[in-house]
């Protein structure tokens, strides 16, 4: 599976010949120090490679084309230490297809009021040069983000780290394959969408396989493979006591068998995400439950009912949050608590919630499933850990993809779920339950979502800018009036 840490970013410093060779040497030296300090900060997920001082159109175009064709490079970080006339950047920027970040920083923190002279002014003029660069990238409408501040400031570095994670996940998305075992759930609208446009915009490839292809793989799984995975299950999870324990263990082994088969199938097809559909299980005697949950815990993207967009987003956000505290799961809005002052949303699914979002040891339980017409499936049961996170839904609005996010506060349930045999998460959406719920429904966002507690919405802002799709955020500042206007303005913008 692709790791975010395999990527690097190229650091390009813009300048020009006007200031003489001595000044360029200083620009080069300062750029090297900035890159070294950023790399040794311990904050950034990926290495920054200092590339060059760029002082003319040819070298800019050549360097950007090289960044574009380097598969390990997830983007370029541009900085104008001095003034770099931006017409020189036009040909290069026209060729750019990788993510681009402009940092508006400078070498010194403080203005040396008493000692500065014109040499200092000519050398340290990123306030000046970064505006020229900002003009041309804005005029050419190049997808980009801008992060301002001193490069040693921890807030600056944290934002840079977020952008890098968003950029690397977006670049990885260009080769993301989501295997669909069966098609979308019949008649459901929001889980469907334009697969060709998804590949053009996001790079997502979403091939469908007949469930028989998976059954063939299932039939080849060996007892030794099942035993090995059962040992992993026993280490990570507790197995609940059942009335008929032999039957339950058999059902758990069946899930292990399914997991081995699905993972082999994904590896063979270079896929990092998948969907299932309970309406299409010919030849399988259980709906994959525990199997999907444990595969999500390993980093695979997943969503039920053929929802390939959510499966892709689960994988994308898992990658963005690789090794960060918190988790990420496929999720579904289920039912509400509507008491005054205690309005909550209960999220769950029929089985498949990722255990990365819990703080406790999940329990493997076997229960009947009232849907899908198959034998009782084994699943992990647990409560999500309290804390902050957000839900994220990507939908096809016909003329465009739209991402909707909602900041949420996960809470401990005030009472025990004594009879609910599935994993669940209880949350308070921001800014408040009613506004958030009304805004979500007005936006057309799905009943499926990706819940993450490892990231915040700023990552999605960067991601949406990079992949150039709409992002509507429901957060602590949202009001319905403003949100409806934003929705309408966006319809106009994205129709144009
Ligand atoms: Mn569902």
Image: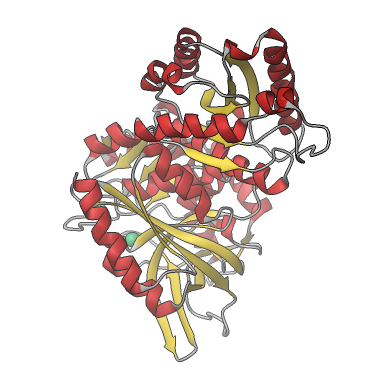
Vertical comparison of 342 with 39: above or below: below
Q: Between 151 and 276, which is closer to the camera in this rendering?
A: 151
Vertical comparison of 82 with 429: above or below: above
In the image, residue 316 lies at what x, y percent? 46, 42
How many numbered badges does the structure rendering display?
0
Q: How is the image coloured?
A: secondary structure
Vertical comparison of 89 with 338: above or below: above
Please give the name of the residue rendered at 66% of the width and 27% of the height, measured from the top-left corner.
47
In the image, residue 243 lies at what x, y percent? 53, 72
In the image, residue 65 lies at what x, y percent? 44, 14
Q: Report the side of 49 relative to 218 (left or right).
A: right
- Residue located farthest toward the bottom when viewing the structure as drawn: 340
In the image, residue 221 lies at what x, y percent? 46, 35
Please give the name of the residue rendered at 54% of the width and 61% of the height, measured from the top-left corner.
389
Please give the name of the residue rendered at 52% of the width and 45% of the height, measured from the top-left corner.
318
Residue 107: which quarter of the image?
A: top right
Q: Is residue 227 visible?
A: no
Ligand 1 is found in the corner quadrant, namely bottom left
Residue 482: which quarter of the image?
A: bottom left
Q: Is residue 98 visible?
A: yes
Q: Quadrant of the C terminus?
A: top left
Q: Between 244 and 227, which is closer to the camera in this rendering?
A: 227
- Residue located farthest toward the right when viewing the structure as drawn: 114
């Amino acid at each position: 599976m692709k790791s975010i840490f395999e990527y690097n970013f190229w650091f390009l410093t813009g300048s020009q010949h006007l200031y003489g060779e001595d000044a360029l040497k200083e620009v080069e030296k300062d750029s090297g120090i900035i890159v070294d300090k950023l790399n040794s900060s311990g904050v950034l997920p990926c290495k920054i490679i200092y590339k060059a001082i760029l002082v003319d159109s040819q070298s800019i175009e050549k360097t950007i084309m090289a960044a574009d064709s380097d598969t390990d490079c997830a983007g370029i970080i541009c900085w104008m230490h001095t003034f770099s006339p931006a017409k020189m950047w036009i040909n290069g920027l026209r060729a750019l297809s990788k993510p681009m970040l402009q940092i508006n920083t400078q070498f010194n923190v403080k203005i040396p009021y008493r000692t500065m002279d014109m040499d200092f002014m000519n050398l340290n003029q990123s306030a000046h040069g970064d505006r020229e660069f900002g003009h041309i990238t804005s005029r050419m409408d190049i997808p980009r983000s801008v992060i301002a501040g001193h490069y040693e400031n921890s807030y600056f570095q944290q934002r840079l780290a977020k952008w890098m994670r968003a950029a690397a996940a977006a670049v990885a998305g260009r080769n993301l394959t989501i295997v669909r075992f069966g098609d979308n759930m019949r008649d459901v609208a929001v889980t469907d969408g334009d697969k060709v446009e998804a590949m053009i915009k996001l790079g997502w490839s979403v091939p469908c396989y007949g469930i028989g292809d998976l059954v063939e793989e299932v039939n080849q799984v060996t007892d030794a493979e099942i035993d090995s995975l059962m040992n992993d299950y026993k280490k990570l999870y507790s197995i609940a006591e059942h009335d008929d324990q032999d039957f339950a263990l058999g059902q758990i082994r069946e899930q292990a068998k399914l997991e081995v088969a699905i993972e082999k199938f994904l590896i063979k097809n270079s896929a990092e995400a998948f969907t299932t559909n309970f309406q299409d299980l010919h030849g399988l005697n259980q709906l994959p439950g525990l199997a999907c949950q444990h595969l999500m815990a390993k980093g695979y993207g997943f969503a039920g009912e053929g929802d390939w967009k959510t499966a892709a987003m689960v994988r994308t956000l898992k990658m963005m949050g690789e090794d960060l505290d918190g988790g990420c799961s496929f999720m579904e809005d289920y039912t509400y608590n509507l008491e005054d002052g205690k309005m909550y949303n209960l999220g769950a699914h029929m089985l498949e919630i990722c255990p990365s979002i819990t703080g406790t040891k999940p329990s493997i339980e076997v229960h009947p499933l009232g849907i899908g017409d198959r034998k009782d499936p084994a699943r992990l049961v647990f409560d999500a850990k309290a804390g902050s996170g957000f839900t994220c839904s990507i939908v096809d609005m016909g003329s465009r993809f739209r991402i909707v996010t909602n900041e949420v506060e996960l809470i401990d349930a005030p009472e025990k779920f004594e009879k609910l045999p599935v994993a669940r998460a209880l949350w308070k959406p921001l800014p408040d339950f009613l506004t958030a719920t009304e805004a979500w429904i007005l936006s057309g966002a799905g009943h499926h979502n990706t819940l993450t507690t490892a990231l915040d919405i700023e990552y999605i802002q960067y991601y949406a800018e990079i992949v150039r799709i709409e992002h509507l955020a429901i957060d602590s500042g949202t009001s319905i009036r403003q949100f409806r206007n934003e929705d309408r303005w966006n319809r106009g913008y994205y129709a144009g």
